[in-house]
Amino acid sequence: MVASGVSKSSSKSVRKSKPKRGLIKFFKEVIAELKKVTWPTRKEWLTSTAVVIVVVVIVAAFIGVLDLVLKQIMDFIF
């Protein structure tokens, strides 16, 4: 049974056209938001990148040393 006289086939065709409009609207909104972004300068970008690389190296070294110490402890115990 169809409630309100609208057939199921006509409601499906309406649903298929909505995603295209929604997708176009989405990309227009993405472009609008990207225009609002304050992008870092080259100097800020390089500084941030250097900080990240240094922190990663320090954390990797710490984990490596910790691993060696714990391995020595485990070898001594077992």
Image: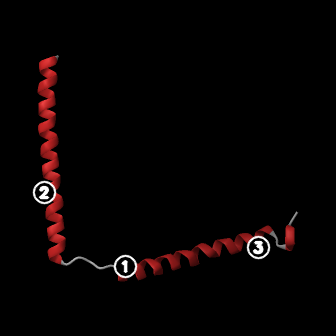
The residue pinned by badge 1 equals 34
Is label 1 in a helix, a strand or a loop?
helix
The residue pinned by badge 2 equals 54
- C-alpha distance separating marks 2 and 3: 61 Å
Q: Residue furthest top?
A: 78
Which image quarter: residue 67? top left
Residue 19: x and y in percent read 59, 72
Is label 2 in a helix, a strand or a loop?
helix
Residue 22: x and y in percent read 56, 75
The residue pinned by badge 3 equals 10
Residue 70 shown left or right of residue 14 in the figure: left
- C-alpha distance separating marks 3 and 1: 37 Å
Residue drawn at (42%, 82%), measured in percent from left and top?
32
Structural crowding at the residue carrying mark 1, measured as other residues with C-alpha within 10 Å and reported as few (<14), some (14–19) or many (≥20) = few
- Count of numbered marks: 3
**Amino acid type assigned to the residue bearing label 2 in the image:** Val
Residue drawn at (70%, 75%), measured in percent from left and top?
14
Residue 50: x and y in percent read 13, 63
Decide: is 77 above or below 25.
Answer: above
